[in-house]
Amino acid sequence: MTINKIAMNITPRIPPKSHTIYTIAIIGFIYTMHLVLPMYSNSSYLSLFADEVLLGYIYMIGAAVSILGYLFAPMLIRCFGNYRIAITLIITQIAIFYGLVTATSSIIIAILFILQSAVISLIGLTLDIFLEVYTDSKHVGAVRGMYAATLNASWIIAPLIGSMLIGNANNYHNTYVAALAMLFPLLYLVFRNFPKFKDPNYTHLSPWQLVKHIGHNKNWVKLFTANAILQIFYAWMTVYCPIYLNKIMGFSWESIGIILTIMLLPFPLIQYPLGKLADRKYGEQEIMVIGFAIVGIATIILSFIRVPNIALWALALFITRIGAAAAEVMMETYFFKTVSPRDSAALGIFRITRPVSFFVAPLIMIVGLMFTTNTYMFAVIGTITLFALIPTLTIKDTN
């Protein structure tokens, strides 16, 4: 049975060019598995030789390198094509992860960690371009919802597998071995399915022209602002929540794996149906607002949970991700309904909010700890997330 037939049997119906869309979804699933397997333990691993301040600087440098990558990516994709850039990035990532598996020097590990965070982001950008080219304008919500749900299914599986690989011995090294293994099928599937990919006639804009291009669309400015806030929430939670659960609440990595798996369930469960609703009945704005309200309030409440109870923490974090999943898929749907595949530069700026968030999140932690404790940092990040209501309440629906 071919990969497309398998995909059609396990996913809801998506209209035109569905075979290729299903293939991209499976590629995205494998890509996300390689990304997430070490993600939630990265900060704990780096903290073995770096305190919270130095850890923050490592993430900030990685974010800065990623931002530079996004700025140069449109030019490189325009010159060499999305397929060639995707293949080159995956091969580069294989070399970097091999280094992470074999390196013993803390300095080399930190450098490789910085590089891999940038390459991961750019691989995701090339997959976005593949998907955008093969998506017709009438089914953006359904396609993006299905794609997000597929990717987020790996977010559910990977933390559990990662925590099992780490085990009681705190063997973080195993997660990098598993992530390296995922890169080989990823390379094969991209190489096998897209050698004849036809790049659209990408728009050529200088950075200043691009800023003006985005600035002329007030709804894009509001959307990018809200997306930046959500990405800061994700970045802060990814870096500091596992450390808090492990070192302050005293959970084992097996328990953390269970908590994270339950926490991430809303992404595959609600994003596809919400995407369909955005296509057929409701606008994106209403669901976006509700999502941000839920995630902000629920995150503030985390500051008042002082009991190391697995079920309680899993439920509380699960509620935060209901809001995050709703807001995320609506922003994705809104953006890809209003952007052309030719606008790889605009897509890069939309995605640049991810590395920017990993630059801002450590700053929030460093400054926040000057005035409060680790426990009340949840209230700080929850309050910041609620500020996304300001742009989303006035954004104009696409429907």
Image (cartoon, grey):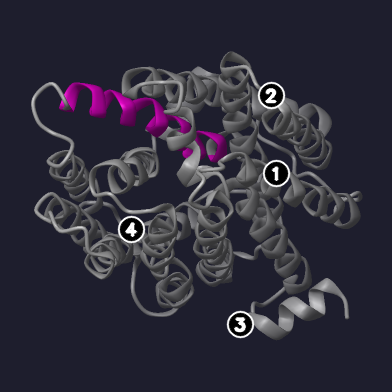
Label annotation for residue 12 = 3
Residue labelled with disc 1: 177
Assign a secondary structure to mark 4. Answer: helix
**Residue 133: where, in percent of width, then height?**
70, 54
For the point 16% across and 26% down, which residue is it?
Answer: 369
Three-letter code for the amino acid on which mark 1 is drawn: Val
Left or right of 149, for residue 100 = right
Of the image marks 2 and 3, the number of the one nearer the N terminus: 3
For the point 44% across and 64% down, which residue is it?
Answer: 261
Q: Is residue 250 magenta?
A: no
Which corner quadrant holds the C terminus? bottom left
Q: Magenta stretch?
A: 347-368
Of the image marks 4 and 2, the number of the one nearer the N terminus: 2
When asked about the image quadrant of residue 214, the answer is: top left
Mark 4 or 1: in front is: 1
Q: Residues within 10 Å of mark 4 (few under 14, many from 20)?
A: many
Whether residues under marks 2 and 3 lie with C-beta atoms below 8 angstroms apart, the answer is no
Of the image marks 1 and 3, the number of the one nearer the N terminus: 3
Residue labelled with disc 4: 324
